[in-house]
Each structure stands twice: as C-alpha cells, then as structure tokens.
Image (spheres, helix red, strand yellow):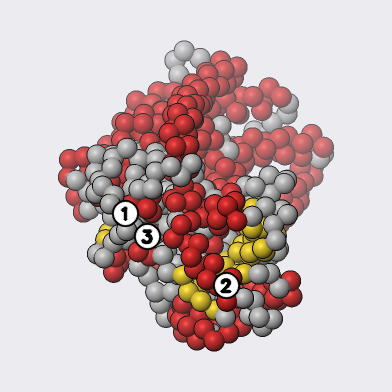
C-alpha cells in the first residue's frame, strides 16, 4: 500500500469533517459577510487542528537532534509549499493582467511576504499604518493565517526537542505538559492584553494566536486518554462532539466585526474545536456525500477562494461592464474554487507529498527554497516596474505644481475662467502615482514620522510648516481630512510668509464627545487629545485657526454616523467654543465629498480601470456630499469669530462630483484629496482665510 493510501486509511473522519466546516465558514464569510458575520472563526478551528496533528506526530516520535528537525521541516515543505507557491504565482500573474496598476505594488509586497511566510506581520504593520489600512484588500492577504502556522511549525518542534533533551524520560510527559502549557498560558494572556489595547494588530500577530495552536498541542498530549474514553462511551463521545459543533456554529453566527478578537473570545471556537477532536466521534453526518472530499481539499480551497473573490469580479467586468460582484460572479467563484482545489489536490499536493524523486530532507528543503525565491523574484520585479513608472509620472507632475496652468485642477471649475470641458484623459498625478500623492503631514517630521497622533493613546504631535520666521501664525486642527488641506495652506503660506502649525489625529474627530473605537483606551485617548489640543491652541493665541474634520465613526452608544449628528454638533460646539475663548478667529472648512458613499471604493483604482473615461469615476453631488455637523456648530458660533469656508463648488459642479478635475486626480484613495489637487485649491481657500484675518 502506498504512503498516500495509508494516510487515507488512517485519516479521521471527524477531523476531515471539522476541516470541511472550517473552510466552509471562511468561504461563506468572505462571500456573504453580512449573513455569516463570525465565519472568520473557521481559521481558529484550523489552528486547533494543526496544533493537534503536528504535536501528536512530534510526541509519538520526539525529535532528538537537528536531523529530525530537518526531516520534519522537509515533510512540511513537501506538504505545503508546492500548492501555496503555485497559487501565489498564479495570483501574481492574474493581478498583473486584470487588477488596476494602482494595486500591483501592494499585491506584490503581500505576495513576497506570503511566499516567505511573514504575511501576518506585514498585515499587522499595515493596519497600524493609517494610509496602508485604507488600501483595497490584496488577493493574497488570506496567507496571514498560513504565516502563523508556518512560524508555529518552525518553533514548536524546537521547543519539543528542547523538552525531550532536558527532561528525563520518566518525567517527559509531565515536562511536555508544563513546557507547552506555559507557552499556551503566556500567549493567551498576551492575546487578551493586545486585543484590548491594539485589536487591529492583535488579530494578525503570531504571539496572540500561538495559544490556539498550542491548545491543540495540549489536546494531543491527552489524546490516548480521550480515545480510550470515547471507545468505552460512544454515546457520550457523540454528545461531546455535538456540543463542540454547536459551540463553533453559534460563535460563527453571533460574532461580528465588532467582537474583540482574538482575545478571550477566541476561546469559544477553540474549545468547540477541541471538543470535536477529543470526542473521537463516529457520527453518520461525517459520511454525508462531499463532506470528506471537502475536508481533503480544504487547504487548496482556502488557497484559491480569496484570490478569486478579489480578482474574478474585475476580470469579469471587462465582459459584463461592472466590477461589482453579482450572483453569477459568486456562483462562478464557488465553482472555480472547488474545481481548482480538486485539481491542486490531485496534481500538486499528492504528487509532491510523496515524491518519487526524493524524500530526503535536504533536496526537499532546497527545492522549496528555490520555489520561494522564484515567487519572491517575480513579486520584486513587479514592484520595480511600478516604481519605475512612478518616477516617470513624477516628471509630468512638476508642471502642475508650478501653478502655470490656471485651468489645472480646481481652476477648471472656476466660472470666471474659460476652461475646456472636464474630459482630460492625460491625468496628473497618474492614477498609479495618485495613491502615493499625500500631504506632507504624513511623513515630514524631522525624525521621518507622521505628524498625526494615532490610536490608541493619541499622543499630541505638533508639526511646523511654511515660513519658520513668519509673522502670521496659522494653526490647522482636525483629523486626516484636515491634513489633506495642508498643501493648499502651504501654497498660501509660501506667498504670504505664514507659519503653519498642525495638530492632527488619525481617525479621531476633533469634537468633544466620546466616539466609538475598538477599545475604551482609544475612545478616552481621542477625547483627551481633542481637549488638550483645543486648550493649548487657545492659550497660544495664534492669528488664525483652520478647523476641519471627517465625521467617520459613530458617537459612543450610537449605531451610525447619521444618528450621531446631534451629538457631534454639540461636541464641535464645545471644541470651537474653547478655541475661540481667547478671541482667536476660526475658519471651519466644510468636509469634502466622499466618493466611497456611491460604491466607489478607491478613485485611483477606478481611474486606472477606466483610463479612457475619467467621468466613469464621478457621482451625483447629492450622494457624495455628506452632512457636516461642524458646519451647524460653526453657524451657532458665528458671533464669536467662527466663519465657514465651503469649497464644494471646487470639487463638484451643480449636479456632479468628479474623481478628476482639470486633468488632476482629486482623491488619493476613497476620500482623501491628493496633494496635487489640494495645492490647486489654494486660490479658492485664500479669500476665506484673509477675510477672517482681516476681522482680527
């Protein structure tokens, strides 16, 4: 009998069914996130299964030296790398063919991280980077969980080797329990802590997930006892298994994206998965047609489903005309996922798992390393291609920034000028460069860091621009939608020798009220930042304060931004009242229209997909133009020196708001102005500021 046949005979039907459920939850969640809001817990089930099987193998045949470790890693390489590297290479090629060029670099960077199995750390870094967090999902970001598992496969056998060597044979099992248990407890404690303080990063990092795999490892130590109990009490075993299945399904339906995760909430699906494995049950449901097959191909299904979800709708849109995924697209994605998974299992996974050419460790590891190097080289080449194109595009950009064309950018909508129709397809910055065309506030501190205070502490950051010796002090206060106005202010300051000081915060609206964040610390930090900044600015008595914000998150205890409007109006009134308490004039800029409200996730992506028709990336003004409670507050304080600057007419005509105006891309993502377009708004903004200064 072949090794493959032996493994098939020994495969546990309950674990295969658990794999089928896990991958089913993940796929359904990714396709229908509003219907199965907690389907992401399927990944946690996979972690428990992997920890159990790997530890069971290592305990049954403990590693005793470097040769045993190499043999283990070689088996893992033969099992995992051929399929994953095939999918990564195919995805990279499909991204180059079908995705807009604006997404090439992110896809390539994530592919490189996935090939080297540190994708989880790449994503953890991205989610704490405000600009990177705004990016569209990459087609390989699901490799984060495989990165966690591979890192576990590297470190866990070393830990078992150390315990095997250091602990006497008579006490080895106890040593395993103590050693592995200590790791599980430490990881769980850290997971709870980091989920409470930095939930976005906590979701991806290895240390917060290690305990889930380790829990499967501890279960492996108890496997002989559990198996004997299950054989003696089959009905009790089935009852335990049913309890485990129910616990997994309940969390899959009840958890949402607001559930703090992983933390202690991950314990529920972990315990449920552990109960199913520990029960060794033999229920008839495991023999339902398709269940065992789906368990067999679950790894390949997981690999293929997400690239298809991201890329297929865009590829099909070239035929259907819309990048939005429809019912037919969803059906095609499901069918393609299952077909590709089946082919991958038979022709790649099985073939390389038991290769006829070599089962030795060194050739297997070398072959895996070569495959990884090829994928990394392809990804690096695509990054280099993008960077070369961006260098060329920057040359064309300089002509706009010198201000020589009065019809460039916002000037094209000025009724006093006779500018040509807004149908220019030669855009600057190019869509590829537009996604990098951000305000100086993001990277111009002396130490190279951003000028934005970030969650969760929102430590106040002060940056200075313009003429350091200027006699007019202008202060810019707000969140990222204030930062987008810095280029316009810099242009005015350059001509008038103003000094600009910024007080900015990412995702924190400068309204004196508690706002909903993932953690209580961020909620408290945001309101503390708002109060500290407003009081500090009032005491400094600058010549002018420019104030503007996006109201992007609900007030605490409210379910939507719209329902929060009255609270935000009151909160803005408090903040503006403090700012004007010492007689400082304040100009409140009305927030800019938001394309994301009309189904356009990213303007540069849209323009790249419609390079011959920029108007396709426009939308109705009454949809894009959102309510701004800071304007209502400003009107209430007009008698205290608060005035309003509404530049919406420089972003929209009477009926339409545009993604590109006067040959200039308006937005760098889904709602932030490009540095270039903001620069062209200086002539429109200046009169409001000068009038306010004149009143002073």
Label 3 to label 2, Cα distance in Å?
Answer: 24 Å
Q: On the rendered structure, is 153 left or right of 408?
A: right
Q: Nearer the viewer, residue 292 or 422?
A: 422
Q: Secondary structure at mark 3?
A: helix
Q: Nearer the viewer, residue 60 or 124?
A: 124
Label 2 to label 1, Cα distance in Å?
Answer: 27 Å
In percent of the image, x 81 and y 40: which residue is there? 167
Q: Nearer the viewer, residue 519 or 207?
A: 519
In percent of the image, x 66 and y 80: which residue is there? 583
* Label drawn at residue 650: 3
Q: On the rendered structure, is 449 left or right of 356?
A: right
Q: Is residue 445 above or below residue 262?
A: above
Instruction: Tell me which numbered mark, 3 or 2, is placed earlier along the sequence.
Output: 3
For label 1, the residue is 417
Q: Is residue 27 above or below residue 566?
A: above
Occupied quadrant, residue 53: top right
Give the image location of residue 67, x and y in percent: 68, 22
Q: On the rendered structure, is 398 left or right of 24?
A: right
For label 2, the residue is 694
Labels 3, 2: front one:
2
């Amino acid at each position: 009998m072949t090794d493959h046949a032996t493994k098939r005979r020994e495969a546990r039907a309950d674990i295969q069914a658990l794999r089928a459920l896990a991958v089913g939850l993940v796929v359904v969640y990714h396709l229908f996130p509003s219907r199965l809001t907690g389907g992401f817990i399927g990944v946690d089930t996979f972690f428990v299964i992997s920890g159990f099987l790997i530890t069971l193998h290592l305990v049954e045949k403990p590693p005793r030296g470097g040769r045993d470790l190499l043999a283990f890693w070689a088996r893992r390489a033969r099992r995992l790398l051929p399929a994953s590297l095939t999918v990564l290479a195919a995805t990279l090629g499909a991204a180059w063919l079908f995705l807009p060029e604006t997404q090439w670099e992110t896809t390539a960077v994530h592919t490189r991280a996935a090939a080297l199995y540190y994708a989880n750390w790449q994503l953890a870094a991205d989610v704490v980077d405000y600009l990177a967090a705004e990016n569209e999902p990459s087609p390989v970001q699901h490799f984060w969980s495989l990165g966690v598992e591979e890192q576990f496969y590297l470190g866990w056998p070393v830990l078992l080797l150390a315990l095997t060597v250091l602990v006497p044979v008579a006490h080895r099992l106890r040593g395993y329990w103590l050693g592995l248990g200590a790791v599980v407890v430490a990881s769980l404690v850290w997971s709870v802590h980091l989920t409470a303080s930095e939930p976005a990063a906590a979701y991806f990092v290895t240390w917060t997930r290690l305990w889930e795999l380790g829990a499967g490892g501890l279960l492996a130590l108890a496997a002989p006892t559990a198996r004997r109990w299950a054989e003696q009490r089959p009905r009790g075993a089935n009852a335990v298994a049913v309890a485990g299945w129910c616990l997994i399904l309940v969390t899959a339906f009840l958890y949402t994206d607001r559930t703090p995760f992983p933390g202690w909430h991950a314990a529920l699906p972990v315990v449920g998965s552990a109960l199913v494995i520990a029960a060794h049950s033999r229920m008839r449901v495991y023999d339902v047609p398709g269940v065992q097959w789906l368990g067999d191909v679950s790894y390949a299904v997981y690999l293929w489903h997400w690239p298809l979800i991201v890329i297929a709708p865009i590829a099909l849109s070239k035929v259907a005309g819309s990048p939005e995924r429809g019912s037919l697209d969803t059906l095609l994605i499901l069918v393609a996922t299952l077909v590709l998974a089946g082919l991958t299992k038979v022709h790649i996974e099985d073939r390389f798992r038991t290769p006829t050419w070599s089962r030795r460790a060194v050739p297997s590891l070398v072959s895996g390393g070569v495959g990884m190097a090829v994928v990394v080289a392809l990804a690096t080449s695509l990054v280099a291609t993008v960077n070369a194109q961006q260098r060329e595009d920057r040359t064309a950009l300089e002509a706009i920034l010198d201000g020589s064309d009065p019809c460039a950018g916002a000037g094209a909508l000025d009724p006093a000028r006779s500018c040509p129709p807004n149908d220019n397809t030669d855009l600057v910055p190019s869509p590829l460069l537009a996604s990098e065309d951000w305000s100086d506030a993001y990277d111009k501190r002396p130490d190279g860091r951003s000028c934005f205070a970030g969650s969760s502490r929102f430590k106040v950051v002060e940056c200075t621009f313009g003429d350091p010796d200027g006699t007019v002090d202008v202060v810019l206060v707000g969140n990222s939608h204030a930062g987008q106005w810095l280029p316009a202010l810099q242009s005015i300051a350059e001509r008038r020798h103003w000094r600009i000081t910024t007080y900015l915060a990412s995702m924190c609206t400068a309204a004196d009220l508690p706002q909903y964040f993932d953690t209580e610390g961020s909620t408290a930090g945001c309101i503390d930042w708002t109060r500290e900044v407003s009081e500090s600015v009032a005491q400094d008595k600058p010549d002018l304060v420019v104030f503007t914000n996006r109201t992007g998150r609900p007030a605490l205890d409210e379910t939507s931004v719209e329902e929060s409007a009255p609270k935000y109006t009151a909160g803005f009134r408090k903040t503006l009242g403090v700012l004007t308490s010492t007689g400082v004039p304040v100009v409140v800029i009305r927030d800019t229209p938001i394309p994301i409200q009309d189904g356009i996730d990213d303007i540069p992506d849209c323009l790249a997909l419609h390079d011959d028709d920029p108007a396709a990336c426009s939308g109705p003004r009454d949809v894009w133009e959102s309510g701004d409670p800071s304007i209502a507050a400003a009107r209430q304080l007009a008698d205290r020196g608060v005035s309003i600057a509404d530049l919406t007419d420089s972003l929209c005509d009477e009926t339409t708001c545009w993604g590109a105006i006067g040959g200039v891309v308006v937005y760098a993502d889904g709602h932030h102005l490009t540095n270039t377009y903001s620069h062209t708004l200086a002539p429109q903004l200046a009169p409001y500021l000068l009038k306010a200064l004149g009143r002073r």
